[in-house]
Structure formats: C-alpha cells, structure tokens
Amino acid sequence: MAGGTAAGAAVAGAGVYGLTGLYEGSAEASETLDGAGEMSGGANAELDGVNSPEATELTPFKDPLRIPPTLRPGNRGVTEVGLVESRIRLHSQMPRTRLWTYAGHYPGPTLEMRQGERARIAWTNKLKGAIPVKAVWVHPEGPGPGLLPYNRPGSEGAIARPEIDKLTAWTTVHVHGGHQNALSDGATDYGVTPGNAQLAEYANDMAAAHLFYHDHAMSVTSLNVQAGLMGHCIVRDEEENGLDLPSGRYEIPLAIQEVNFDTDDRGRLNGQILAKRIAFTDPMPGMLPPAAGSLAPFTMVNGVVWPHLEVKARAYRFRLVNTSPSRIYRLVVLDEETGKVVRGAIKLIGTDLGLLGAPETIDEALSLSPAERADIVIDFAAFPGKRLKLVNTVAGQTPGAALPDFAVPFPEVMQFRVARERNAPYKLPTTLSSGFRKLRPEDVPEGAVERFVVLTMDKTGGMPQLWEMQEVPEKTEPGVGIVKIDLPGGTKTLRRTGMMFEDTTRFFAAADTWEKWTFINIAPPEVPIYHPMHIHLMNFQVVDRRAIDSSGMDYAAQGTKKPITTGDRVPVAPEESGWKDTITVNANTLVTVAGRLARQTGKVMYHCHLLDHEDEGMMRPFVIMPSAVHEIHSMQMGMSGDTGDMSGMTM
C-alpha cells in the first residue's frame, strides 16, 4: 500500500438548497419539492482528481471527508427524493465512479426528523441502465504470496457473473430502526421499477436516535447497497436538545463501509465497484455455488476511501454506522506519532436506538457489525496539533498493523488533523437519558411472547441457514429440523417450521407488546461465522448471552443427536448495552433479546444483516397485528387445525 499522508483538497464551502428544488447531482435529473421539505449543508460534494486510471495503490488520508447535505422532510405534504445515477469520485487517485444514488449524493442526504412529526416521502426510481457494480466469484484461496483473492483489487482470475450484468433497478427503501407500517417499511418483495415511486410515511414516534436508510430489494440488497443506495437518518427530541452535546458542524454522521474496485489491464484502479463473492465451488449453469460472504480491502467513510477530517481542538460528536455488506469493524484511535492506542479517547453516549443513561468510556476497541450504530464523543482538546487516526484491528493483534493474509489487509479507516489552537476540555453530561434502564432477565414481563431462531448450516456444513423454530413436547423424537437445547430454565425441544422467506409465515405478534427472542448460532468449530440479527419494528436490549457446546448437532441429519448445552454468560460490550435493533450472534453462542414491538402493523421481516446472507435466504417474515385482531387470528388458526406458532397465541 502506498505510504504518506499528502494533504488533500480543502473542504468545500457548504451549499444551501432552498424550498424550490432538490439537487440531484446529475445533469439530466431535476426534481422539485412541494414545500414539504428543505435540503441544506453538505461539504466536499466533489473531489478533484484524475480522469483516467493511473494508480495501482491508493494513498491513505489524501482526501477530505465528505459530509452529505441534510434533508428535512417536514410534516406536511410529500417530499420527493429521486433515485438517480451519478458519477462521484471516491478517491482522488481514481476516476469518478458510476453509482446509483439518492438525490445524486453518496451517501444520500441525511434525513433529519423530529420526534412526533410524521414525514411522508416519495422515493422515485429514475434509474436507467444496468447496475453499476461488477460482480464476480472468487475462491477463498489463491496461488502466490500477497493478499487473498477476496482482498485483492481487480477481477483477474475471477469467475464472471453474467446474471448480475443484466440487472436493472428494482428498489425498495427501508429506514432501518424506524417505526413505520409495513406498507412503508421497504418490504423486500415490494420493489418498484424505474418510472415508479414508493410512497412511505414515517411516524417518528421514538426517542432521538441515529437510524439509516438503504435499499432492501429481494435477492439484490447487497448489490444495490454497494451500488450506492444508502444514507443517514437522524431523529431529534427535546431531551437530547437540552443536553448541550456537540452539534451543528461539530456533529458528524459517519458511514463506514468496505469496498473493492476493478482494475484495467495494467492493474490500475479504474474506480468501478467490484463485488467479490467467495465461492467454495465453481458455479454450475442456472445454479449459485455454495458461498460465504463478500469481503473487500478498502474502507470508505461517507463515500471517500480513507479520508481525513480537519478538526478543532474541541469535542465532536460522531454518529457511526457500519453499512458494509459483511465486515465487522473493531475501531481504535491511534496517535500517529507514537503509534500507540489513545485509550479512553472514545466516549460512548448511545447505541442503535438512542442515548444511554450515562456515558461509557471505551478503553480499547469499539466493535460494530453491519447495521450497528454507535453515538460517540471524541474530545480533541487534549491533542492540539496532533494527527490521530481511526483504524480497524483484530483482537490480539497490534493495532494499526496490516494483516495481508487475513481479513484486514489495510487497517486505515480515517484520520483526524487537529488544529493547534487550544480549547478547554469538554465535560459530558453525567446523565444522558433520564428514562434509560438496563434490562435484566427478571425485568421482562411474565407474559412476553418467547421465540426461538436457530442459525446453522446446511447438510454440507458450508452454507448458512436460518431456522424458524416452534417449541414442541420434550418427548418429541429426534429427526430433521428437531433441535434440543439445555437452557438455564430447562431443556427445550424445538421444531423447524420455516427456513426460506417464501415458506409459510408462522410468527404472528400483537403490536405494542413485549417479546423475547433467542438466537442460537450453531456452527462447526472450524467455521467462526457470525450473524448480526435485525428485527424490524422492535426496540430491544440484550438480556442474556452464553457460549454453547454445539457438538450435539448432526448437520447431515439436520438435527441434534444430543442436546445443545449452554455455558456461562458472555459479557455484553458497552456498545451493545443500550437499546438496539441489531445484535451480533457469534459462532456457538446464544443471545436472548427482549423489548416492546412498535405500534405499527403489517408483515415485516427479521434477518441476518450480512447482506449476502440476507439475499440468499437468511430472512423470514412476521406479521404484527392490533391485539384484538391477533386474538381473533389465533382462534381462527386453531379452528382450521393449524396451530402455527404456538408461542404467539394468546388463548
């Protein structure tokens, strides 16, 4: 990787877009607002740089961070956001990249909404032509020294995916973590084609939080997100406004995302997004091969590879979200001069769905799986004139070290260039959310509906699967889809009732009621696979996490030959300790979450947020109904002889 930290172009002045137009960033696109919203701000919308391939390596920290403009939809009328193609430079040493974008920006405009104010948005698909992502298959190992194939730029030696080359835009927008009825939730099978719009209403009946929005179209979510369809969303409330947290230019959302690029015949990076899917066998005509997730060597922050940010020697609030298809980030702050970790530099003030009760100091690393968020404060007052960098690291390894034969070839994420002028240190509020309470198992209401989901492998032990389970009598004989597990409260026998999205819906729930979900990740010892599990329309906390002994699983027989056993509790990290909508379930662990479903209703989803896993079947629907309707529905299922999901019945 090229060395050096050459200064990049200065951050451009903020542009302001008034009530009469919504800038879409492409010459052929022009949108109008109906007075329902306004867009303003944004910096470094376009980087200067080369117009043809020149570099085989990229220089870290050369370019300034891009800050997307803010779009305030308002609470009257409908705000239209066009999905349009744009060409945006992701690093100054590469030509511009062809992308699909929201309103011409990458990331899309940051939606800013207020608690209790409904917003209505028409997401209009104006995209033309084939998807701008080049997709290929690679095998997990390759000849010769250097980077493993999936961490190597370029498609040389890869297997083409002609079925992807034919894709045109089929899109549906999901506001991740938001409260919206199913019709507005971006259901995976509710995609719209070019020339059509998705009309959505967002209730915003929730505490202040950093959400994000992204495409959610069935079978192509990963590709559409890699093509550029994602953006930040921030909900504000009065409690947060009264805390005097860093705001305005000192509050910055950061979308962290892995990325790879294709190369020309001379190995020079041409800027085209390259999706390398790891395949264990060669593809057969008309069939997808067994495959793992996609990993990539470079890291973008807000659509710039390894950017830098000029900061004052004062406190900043950063709203982090991992928008990667697969990669976990384990973030630390390093002092460039000493190469040492700046311990305690990161103060955690919130998780996925809002503020903690009090700040937490991150002594070492802050971990974020895909879709997880962290609300942090870094006070640069103690570092005037210094250069700090945010890097990705692996537990047990030297922070900042490259690991070219492993999953983190280039650890760089971004750099902070601190001004020399000194300022007084910032004092965080001792209380953030006065109403926050950490849930304990005994705090979960006795009547909470209990659900079980097994995350496991297919018969070969190589492809991940999601099994939706129903509790059955303990005396049930072993067989296909039968899992016995020894839990602290006793042995449970579970039967598989669904595996693919298209299987019969079995989970039915009553709106605004408590639920407790247990995810059990059963994996062979040699497969350290993780699954960040996301439940739509449910704010939850982790109430239990345990190691499990999964040696009782017989993958060929698709069931247990002896009960899965549970061990001691595994600690919950500070960044997992608040209200969340996504939780990482590591290999051979069990995670139980509990919380209250939203008031909104309809058929929504839960799924793994490794986007390739989601696209290939690790997603199931569930239906939320008004309580009275749910009771009648349960009676009707009983009359028909189909008891369905017994755990969700109220009779």
Image (cartoon, grey):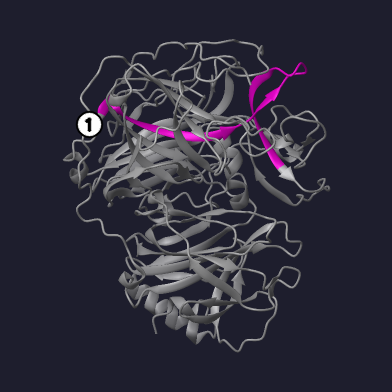
User: Residue 489: where, in percent of width, then height?
Assistant: 46, 80
> Which residue is more in the foreground, 634 or 401?
401
**Amino acid at circle 1:** Tyr
Mark 1, Cα crowd under 10 Å, few <14 / some 14-19 / many 20+, is some
> Which residue is more in the foreground, 396 or 627?
396
Residue projecting furthest to the bottom: 475
Q: Main secondary structure of the magenta part?
A: strand
| Quarter the N terminus occupies | top right
User: Residue 3: where, in percent of width, then height?
Assistant: 59, 17
User: Residue 372: where, in percent of width, then height?
Assistant: 45, 46
Which residue in the protein does label 1 denote? 426
User: Residue 407: where, in percent of width, then height?
Assistant: 64, 39
Name the residue at 69% across, 41% down: 277
Q: Quadrant of residue 270?
A: top right
Name the residue at 29% across, 40% down: 113
Stretch in magenta: 248-277
Q: Is residue 50 left or right of residue 372?
A: right
Asked if 618 appears above or below 513 in the picture, the reply is above
> Which residue is more in the foreground, 266 or 438?
438
Q: Is residue 52 left or right of residue 645?
A: right
Q: Quadrant of residue 68?
A: top left
Could you tell me if residue 459 is visible in this image?
yes
> Which residue is more in the foreground, 36 or 435?
435
Name the residue at 54% across, 67% down: 453
Q: Secondary structure at mark 1?
A: loop
